[in-house]
Amino acid sequence: MGDSKKTKIIMPKEPQIEILSYKRRQRLFQFLVLVFLIALPAMIFYTTGYRLNFENSDSTFITTGGMYVTTDTLEVDVYVDEKQVEKPRLFRSAYYIQNIEAGMHRIVVQKSDLHTWVKELPVDPRIVIEASAFNMPVKPNIRPITEFTTADNQPVFMMASSAVNVFAKATSTVTFIATTTVASSSLKTNEEYIFVDSLFGTSSLSRRSAISRLLDEVDRFRFATTTDTQSTTTKEVIVKKGDVRLVYKNNDVYAVWQNGLNNIPYYYCVGESDFISTSERFGEHVAEAIFGQDASINTVLFESDRVCRLEVKLNRLGQDVYYYDFFPNSSDLVLLLLSDGLYVTEIDDRAWQNTQLLYPGDNFEVVVENDIIYIKEDDSYFEIITEIETE
Amino acid sequence: MDSEDKSHLLPYARRPDFKVAKATELTGKDRRFFRFLEIVPGVAAWTTIIGIILASMYAPFFAAYFIIAFSIYWVLKTIFLSIHVRYNLKRLKHHMELDWGSLIKRFRYEQMHHLVIFPFYNEPREVLEETLKGLVESNYDKEKLIVVLAAEQRAGDDARELALDMERQFGNKFAHFLVTIHPEDTIGEIAGKGSNTHHALHQVREKVIDPQNIDYKNILTSIFDIDTVIYPDYFNCLIWHFMTAENPYKSAFQPVPLFTNNLWEATAVARVMAMSSTFWQMIMQERPDKAATFSSHSVSFQALYEIGYGQANVVSEDSRIFWNLLVANDGNFEVVSLSYPIAMDATTASSLWGTVKNIYRQHRRWTYGVENWCYLVYHFTKNKSIPLKKRWSIAALQGEGYWSLVTNPIMLFILGWAPIFLGTREFHATVLSYELPIMVRNLLIVAMLGLVVSSIISLSLTPPRPEGHSRFKYIVMALQWIMVPMTMIVFSAIPGLDAQTRLMFGRYMGFWVTPKRQK
């Protein structure tokens, strides 16, 4: 016989898991209401710039501001007051730097093989100050445009001697063939070369004065108008992009805002209303432009919380300006052809204007057509590549 | 004029306006008041949406603070509701493991009958067969089951023949099997499940219940969608809850609808919507004091008889029947959650676009349930026997529910960014302007962690993988929840806004039959 003792399973009379009781739900609800009441003011304080400062023995609230820096160059290093900012990227081409205490701060945007951009700006509590950085390559990137190409569109340079160093001061972004022998039967004519050649016309290689060349070639450089405004030394030549006009007068180039205050770029404006504070925060030249003797209702506009000038003088490094135009695809940057090379300068003159050498030399010509910079040097044509290659 | 005998009805249910469906059925002050109530939800929703846009433009700081507050509220609400879902999952699984047949042995329930009504339109044969097989395979004495297959005359001879064929196939397996044909174009009705059920209840009382002399109090009526396949112990579980309910004749019994019949065949978007609906019902299972009946549910025949079987002139008949019962019983009616599943169909179609359209229409019909809020508030002002606190709390809760259904997803995923794009220059220069998107994004990420919980729970409720379906689909089922922000807007907010706007302009909706599996 088997084991007479059988395990008896006793079925419970009730399900063991009760419904979530009203009392428990109420407690949970009350707890979450409490969390809400604590979290809401804390998060509002945080998002408006207040921070708890633990540096002193007594923890205190401090108010912070921020910086918003746009840049077209990817993977740059950003420093504020010599400290690198960790993962500052908010969007693909913009950096939002939080938790900056009120006061003057130096911001540096740099990357190897590129020019460094530096700016010193004032940060106010609960306010974000904007800036736009740019970093041009130290060694220019170019794309040769040759008269002939191979069947698969590779540029072919015809040289008198194989000892000639082609593009010594630049890096070509495309591979090309340099040859001393002509085998035109295997090559084809480059249509782009014909186009670029027509842009430069048949002018001599010698550099002419900017004014005379610009006046000669008004249509080529897309200048909207040319007017004699004062004397022969103040002949005004105008280049326009959007609401910004580049004006050449008294041997200087000015970026002039042509619209109202609605969409005026931030760097035309300051929040102060007196010379001294503006001078301390943005530089004497800015204060002078706004509060100086030459400022007038025609050049300065006032709003409740800011004052804006309508023109900014560009930094020509004390050299003659031979040519100027907007940098391709930008109304914040300007190309200046000076005595020793082609430069890119920012209109934003707060603190100072960053000016970076794009292509060195004293014997070449420039044409900007359809947002492409073409250079003619030593009977060779090439395009300056303005988009920075990123890994 | 209504010449129907009303002597069996509860006193409040005898009012001529008891079964009002829309303002046009009333006159004078009542009509104007009901019309006002129909306008309120749409106005509230549009005012909120437009208000946030205007605030973003003209008072961006206020709008930003409001959005931060709302985002925190959303995170906490997600936590609150997730706890309900998790708790109910535990209870649901426990209930599925119990032997309800043994549990009810201590009760005397031999006298109880189950009346099961299956209204249908033109659903395919396999849907009906699967549903009726579910009944046959249930662990309950079939001699206590009265089954009514309620066909529609407007569906034509094919539907009628199919019903009769089902009667031939399954008729002898139950105590009674009745096929009813709901006549088309009946004055005072709108074509749909509500009117068909209403007709079927009349018919079964005349043809089966009264001739068999069955006490109405001994009949538990289950009104099921035609795709409802019961789990084997459903009737035992129902009996247990009926016997242990504080007031069984003043209770409606709500199972958890699992839209799993065709889950493996359904598209990802259909699965997400189906499971989202299940989750909402699981939440309501843990807070029955705030719930109304939804889709398939059960209630005493006596209770239905006392209100004249509910309304045949509304779209959202499944919930309206509960509000009819609540109002007629002076507030003394409640939902008892069974935490026991029934299986139903996820909404599908032969193409993805067809599925999207069907889900949209189904949810527009569901969200047209806002018509119940008008009904409730109207009768709350008439029936002073309902405790004032109860009237206020239900009206506020239901109102908030319909308002948040429409506005919250739009506020959360679209308008949360409005101050950044629409704000003033002064606002754009502030830290707040830059921190707002970061804060909202982070809070939404925290809230989205609830989706991980949803994903895990949904997998645990998914039926075993049938032959012919790849294991890879499990990964799709886990990842499909990333679509929730989109589904909340496309299948909750927009159809809800559509429904409320229609009601606001007096463009009353009819009943749209959700297509079941494809023929």
Image (cartoon, coloured by chain):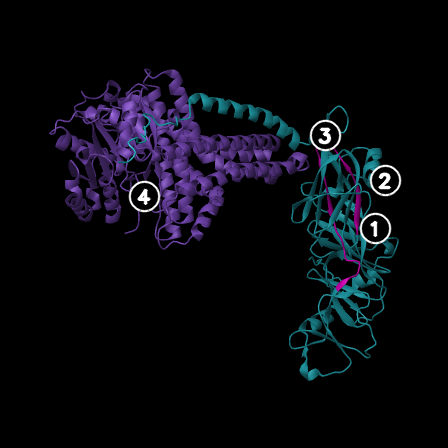
Residue A261 sits above or below residue B110 on the image: below
The answer to the question of whether label 1 and label 2 lie on touching residues, with beta carbons closer than 8 A, is no
Q: Which residues are magenta?
A: A116-141
**Numbered label attached to residue A63:** 3
| Label 3 in the same subunit as label 2 | yes
Whichever of callouts 3 and 1 sits on the residue coming sooner in the sequence is 3
| Whole-percent x, y for residue B37 in the image | 38, 27
Tag 4 residue? B514
| Whole-percent x, y for residue B366 in the image | 36, 37
Residue at screen point 40% across, 45% down: B271
Query: Rounded to the nearest whole Å, what is the CA distance between mark 3 and mark 2?
Result: 28 Å
Chain letter for mark 1, please: A
The answer to the question of whether label 4 and label 1 lie on touching residues, with beta carbons closer than 8 A, is no
Type of the residue with mark 4: Thr
Type of the residue with mark 1: Asn
Who is closer to the viewer here, B380 or A194? B380
- Could you tell me which secondary element the residue under label 3 belongs to? strand
Chain letter for mark 4, please: B
Query: Rounded to the nearest whole Å, what is the CA distance between mark 1 and mark 2?
Result: 15 Å
Q: Which chain is purple?
A: B
| Whole-percent x, y for residue B168 in the image | 14, 45
